Amino acid sequence: MKTIFVNGTFDIIHLGHLALFNYAKSLGDFLLVGIDSDQRVKQLKGTSRPINNEFERKTLLENLKAIDKVQIFNSDQELIDIISTCDIMVKGSDYIGKPIVGEHVCKQITFFDRINEYSSTQKILSIINR
């Protein structure tokens, strides 16, 4: 069985995320999605995030057809431990040429071409500015 891994905050799910999950699932048999804990999101994106807490984000993702399992992580080491169990990690194309946490334990990294008009941050800003 080939396990595929994708990780992120996945705070506000949009069509770009769905395309990413469907692409990742097409690469193997089992799609594992790692999500940043609420504490980690606040450290990475500021105190106003996440919009949806980790329980809500995990539950929503677990109910998407392409996703087989969702795991919450709180540190780089926890993320590395998860990645080490997978065959392929899929990252957005904006990570090409940048350091990737866990790349040293990953068997293969595949990049997904981001769909530029989709961004959780942009969606949140759009809602605020209405």
Image (spheres, grey):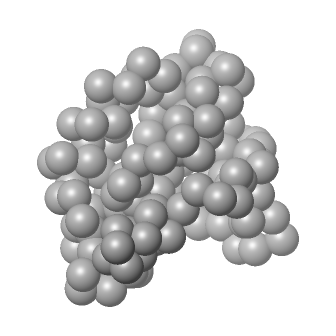
**Residue 94 shows in this picture:** yes
Q: Is residue 33 left or right of residue 3?
A: left
Q: Position of residue 29 (x, y in %)?
A: 58, 15
Res 106 visible: no
Q: Quadrant of the N terminus?
A: top right
Question: Residue 11 placed where, x, y %?
Answer: 34, 57
- In this orientation, which residue lies closer to the viewer: 88 or 93? 93
- 33, 120: nearer the viewer: 120
Q: Position of residue 18 (x, y in %)?
A: 53, 36
Which residue is located at x 30 percent, y 30 percent?
62
Residue lying farthest to the right in this orientation = 97
3 relative to 109, above or below: above
**How far from the left and from the top, in percent, is residue 82?**
45, 46
Q: Name the residue located 27 percent from the left edge and 37 percent from the top edge.
A: 60
- In this rendering, the answer to whether 70 lies above or below 25 is below
Marks counted in the figure total 0
User: Quadrant of residue 63 in the image?
Assistant: top left
Question: Nearest the camera: 18 or 117?
Answer: 117
Measuring 70% from the left and 24% from the top, which residue is drawn there?
27
Q: Residue extending furthest front?
A: 130
Q: Residue at x 40, y 59 (%)?
A: 9
- Quarter residue 42 falls in: bottom left
Considering the image in quadrants, where does the C terminus appear?
Answer: bottom left
Query: Where 102 falls versus 29 (above or below)?
Result: below
